[in-house]
Image (tube, coloured by chain):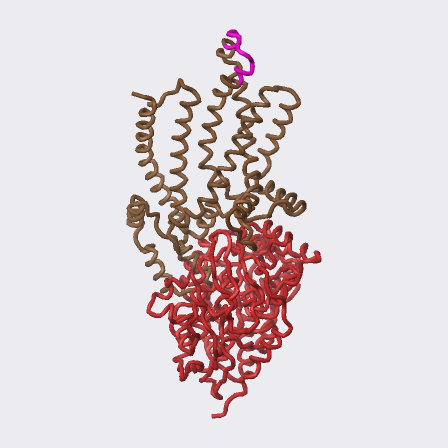
Chain colours: A brown, B red
């Protein structure tokens, strides 16, 4: 069997395995969320100042919240299987549309963050490992420690103070300039300008992690027997580092990046909140306090699907990085 | 029948003409803070704060109210009340069009009040409860027929409280669910364009607005920024020009107001009338005895709470009614409301009532629930814990999230003492009665009589005070109401909250309405 057809088969199998995992996640989430006291109707009525019990009963009926829990769960599961994530009563919109709308913003922030964090993390880790125990190594290590230890919201606020208020280079918050409503290329430029500060803030934390990991991983690989063999064969240090050690050292970093994609949705709540970035993290956070369970379940479902998918992609990347690893 | 002198025919053209003559500059975009993001845009179904910030720019009311409480004609040009107070005739403005081009008529007014506000609005059933029918003899006359006189009704015609909505887009539909809720079509100075979830709501100038020359602004954008520090930074950076309802926390506002380009005002909240207070469970728990409640009110240093926690913005409460009701002669200062707090007197009340201190100086223990609307309230709770400790009441604080807290207080009555705040609104009938009336003990309804206080004498007074058309008699009745409440104290008022508006000084023309941020901004303009 050729390698590519093997991979296809493997992907199909893994996706099938993912289905029961995701359904289990949905069911567990459903019951966990329903443990919280109060429902969407209470919050809506509370915000309105006052509402009659009849009105609230009517709302519950409309939302389907008057049904017993198992019935609600079955209805929800049935909808999920037809790719309908239900209706958000808070936003008065289908959950699909809401999530799709926000996912673009989160996707943008996530992608740029991963590229920046993994890219620079690998680069800095590599540099530190190659210049072990020199001042460069020390500077990189200290930088990584400080960024790792600094709270995200504080970094975000300091970014705003320095780069928006004092230097005026970037806007404080939001995704677009609402006074202008740009179109075409101007819009792209505008969004990019708004993207800079949140991306840097969110990457700093992960950057530190990848730097430390890459450095350790490189050092470990340098000590392996195959490096000695390579040297004995007379390969240049350059070739040993970039072709042999680097590829092997990347494996744990890629694994970590895969695991953290899921965490990025949640971890971006703080950054999204500080920079008013209209992403999924913020939406999840708000819907928890509004007891908008349909929406929350939808977001959880999406992130669990994302984690399953990314882990699959990581496993496939493995076999390209290290030909000894085979999918089965 | 002799008519009362309440006609304000002339005011319309004069006032507005005058304002337009002073004239601002046309053009520009105003972006302002809307916090938090509204759940829907149906201001005729929900009175939720953020909806109020946006929708009065799109929907209009029959009247607006200026900072002195004077009625400013908007969709109505004048009104006329019969001598017995049971018929109110509104003359409506001619030539007003909905944003979709259809004319605004008396049929819209009748439909809005009878089928929308009286049925689905949270407060409408109360404001218009005496309205039995509305006659529409012609397209520009609406006659309200009342069962009993309802003087308070005249305070609830603002765009925020009673928005006029298009009959042709709601009739025959499920009113709460009609497409209008998120695609509003009003008569106001700004048209709804777009709501980008998580980012902004965009309103553009209504070029066919009935008032020639208005509005000045080309566009209004309401922005949502979840983090308070970032909101402050956006204000400093000039990215937003206006922030109300403490979107900028007091702690930042006092710093910002020292800047040349930013100023702060407490105007624009008199129709809202927020009052910080403590609700007691009068049926079970530690505070069944009114003497303890009086002692607590006596012990609290209201001045300290205002100065230390709210940076000086607030007025000590002096009765069950806000001092803003002095304008209508309904407020009277009462005993048991010392500004500075008198712990010796409070201890004396408790000693006399027979609550002995144990070896640790503790008379009784209780749990204090705190409204989960931010840090300020938490600090208020911490102060209360300390102050009550001094008179031998040992409190434990409980801070939960909004749904849990609402359930506890208004569904299960599972609380003893609860720090909260209520809007007293432009008339006690609208905002205060719901606290005390026996008919307001409504399990599962939020922000009503959670104390379950019930006093037939008070009920009778509330009932007759509501519809009393004679101003002097009404004053006397409300004085008696306040006396009873100062004695029984099912609720201890703490202080009148003064919310802030933080604004960039280049924004002008939006500070004259008593509705403040809930106003239309039609005369707002940017002056660089």
Looking at the rendering, in which quadrant would you find the N terminus of chain A?
A: top left
Q: Residue at x 60, y 42 (%)?
A: A154
Q: Which residues are magenta?
A: A230-241
Task: Answer yes or no: is residue B368 visible.
Answer: no
Residue at the extreme top: A232
Image coordinates for residue B356, horizontal then vertical, percent: 57, 58
Q: Is residue A257 above or below residue B37?
A: above
Image coords of residue A17 (percent x, y): 31, 32
In terms of depth relative to the viewer, which is nearer, A247 or B501? A247
A254 within the magenta span:
no
Q: Of B376 and B255, which appears nearest the observer?
A: B255
Above or below, A19 against A326 in this view is: below
Q: Quadrant of residue B482?
A: bottom right
Residue lying at the far front in this picture: please name it.
Answer: A184
Task: Identify the residue shown where x is 47% and y is 47%.
Answer: A285
Question: Can residue B518 be seen in this snapshot?
Answer: yes
Going 51% across and 67% down the picture, which residue do you hit? B206
On the rendered structure, is A313 left or right of B209? left
Percent of width and height locating residue A165: 65, 47
Is residue A239 found inside the magenta-colored segment of the image?
yes
């Amino acid at each position: 069997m050729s390698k590519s057809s093997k991979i296809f088969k493997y992907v199909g199998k893994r996706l099938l395995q993912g289905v029961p995992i995701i359904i289990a996640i949905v069911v567990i989430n459903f019951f966990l969320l329903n443990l919280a006291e109060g429902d969407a109707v209470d919050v809506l009525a509370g915000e309105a100042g006052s509402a009659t019990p009849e009105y609230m009963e009517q709302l519950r009926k409309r939302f389907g919240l008057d049904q017993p829990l198992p019935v609600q769960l079955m209805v929800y599961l049935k909808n999920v299987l037809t790719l309908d994530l239900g209706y958000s009563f808070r936003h008065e919109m289908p959950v699909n549309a809401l999530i799709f709308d926000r996912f673009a913003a989160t996707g943008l922030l996530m992608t740029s963050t991963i590229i920046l964090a993994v890219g620079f993390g690998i680069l800095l880790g590599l540099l530190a490992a190659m210049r072990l125990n020199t001042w460069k190594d020390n500077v990189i290590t200290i930088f990584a420690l400080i960024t790792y230890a600094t709270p995200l919201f504080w970094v975000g606020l300091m970014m705003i103070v320095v780069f928006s208020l004092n230097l005026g280079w970037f806007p404080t918050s939001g995704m677009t300039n609402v006074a202008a409503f740009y179109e075409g290329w101007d819009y792209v430029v505008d969004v990019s300008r708004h993207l800079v500060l949140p991306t840097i803030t969110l990457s700093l934390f992960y950057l530190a992690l990848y730097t430390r990991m890459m450095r350790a991983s490189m050092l470990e690989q340098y000590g392996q027997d195959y490096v000695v063999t390579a040297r004995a064969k007379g390969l240049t240090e350059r070739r040993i580092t970039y072709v042999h050690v680097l590829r092997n050292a990347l494996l744990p970093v890629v694994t970590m990046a895969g695991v953290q994609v899921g965490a990025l949705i949640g971890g971006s709540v703080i950054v999204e909140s500080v920079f008013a970035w209209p992403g999924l993290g913020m939406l999840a956070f708000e819907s928890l306090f509004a007891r908008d369970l349909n929406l929350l379940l939808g977001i959880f479902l999406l992130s669990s699907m994302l984690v399953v998918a990314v882990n699959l992609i990581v496993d496939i990347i493995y076999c390209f990085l290290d030909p000894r690893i085979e999918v089965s | 029948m002799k008519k009362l002198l309440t006609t304000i025919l002339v005011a319309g053209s004069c006032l507005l003409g005058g304002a337009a003559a002073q004239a601002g500059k046309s053009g520009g975009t105003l972006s302002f803070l809307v916090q938090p993001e509204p759940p829907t845009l149906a201001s005729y179904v929900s009175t939720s704060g953020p909806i109020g910030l946006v929708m009065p720019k799109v929907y209009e009311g029959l009247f607006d109210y200026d900072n002195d409480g004077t009625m400013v004609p908007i969709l109505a040009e004048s009104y006329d009340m019969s001598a017995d107070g049971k018929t109110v005739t509104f003359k409506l403005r001619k030539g007003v069009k909905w944003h979709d081009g259809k004319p605004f008529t008396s049929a819209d007014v009748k439909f809005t009040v009878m089928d929308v506000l009286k049925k689905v609005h949270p407060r409408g059933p109360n404001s218009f409860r005496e309205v039995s029918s509305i006659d529409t003899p012609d397209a520009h006359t609406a006659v309200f027929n009342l069962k009993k006189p309802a003087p308070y009704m005249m305070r609830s015609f603002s765009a925020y409280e009673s928005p006029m909505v298009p009959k042709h887009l709601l009739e025959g539909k499920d009113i709460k669910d009609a497409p209008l809720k998120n695609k509003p079509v009003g008569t106001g100075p700004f048209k709804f364009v777009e709501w980008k979830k998580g980012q902004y709501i965009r309103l553009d100038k209504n070029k066919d607005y009935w008032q020639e020359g208005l509005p000045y602004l080309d566009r209004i954008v309401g922005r949502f920024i979840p983090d308070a520090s970032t909101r402050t930074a956006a204000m400093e950076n000039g990215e937003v020009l206006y922030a109300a309802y403490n979107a900028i926390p007091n702690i930042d506002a006092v710093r910002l107001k020292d800047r040349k380009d930013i100023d702060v005002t407490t105007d624009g909240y008199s129709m809202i009338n927020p009052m910080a207070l403590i609700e007691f469970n009068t049926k079970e728990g530690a505070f069944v005895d009114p003497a303890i409640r009086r002692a607590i009110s006596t012990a609290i240093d209201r001045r300290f709470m205002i100065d230390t926690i709210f940076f000086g913005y607030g007025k000590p409460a002096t009765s069950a009614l806000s001092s803003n009701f002095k304008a209508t002669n309904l407020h009277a200062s009462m005993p048991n409301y010392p500004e500075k707090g008198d712990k010796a007197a409070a201890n004396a009340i408790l000693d006399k009532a027979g609550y002995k201190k144990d070896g640790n100086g503790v008379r009784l223990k209780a749990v204090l629930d705190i409204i989960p609307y931010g840090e300020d309230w938490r600090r208020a709770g911490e102060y209360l814990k300390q102050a009550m400790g001094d008179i031998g009441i040992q409190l434990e604080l409980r801070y939960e999230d909004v749904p849990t807290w609402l359930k506890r207080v208004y569904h299960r009555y599972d609380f003893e003492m609860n720090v909260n705040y209520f809007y007293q609104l432009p008339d006690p009938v609208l905002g205060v009665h719901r606290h005390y009336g026996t008919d307001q003990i409504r399990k599962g309804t939020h922000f009503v009589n959670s104390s379950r206080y019930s006093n037939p004498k008070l009920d009778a007074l509330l009932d007759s005070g509501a519809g009393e058309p004679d101003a002097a008699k009404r004053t006397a009745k409300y004085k008696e109401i306040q006396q009873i409440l100062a004695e029984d104290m099912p609720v201890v008022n703490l202080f009148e909250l003064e919310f802030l508006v933080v604004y960039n000084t280049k924004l002008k023309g939006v500070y004259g309405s008593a509705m403040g941020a809930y106003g239309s901004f039609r005369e707002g303009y940017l002056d660089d």
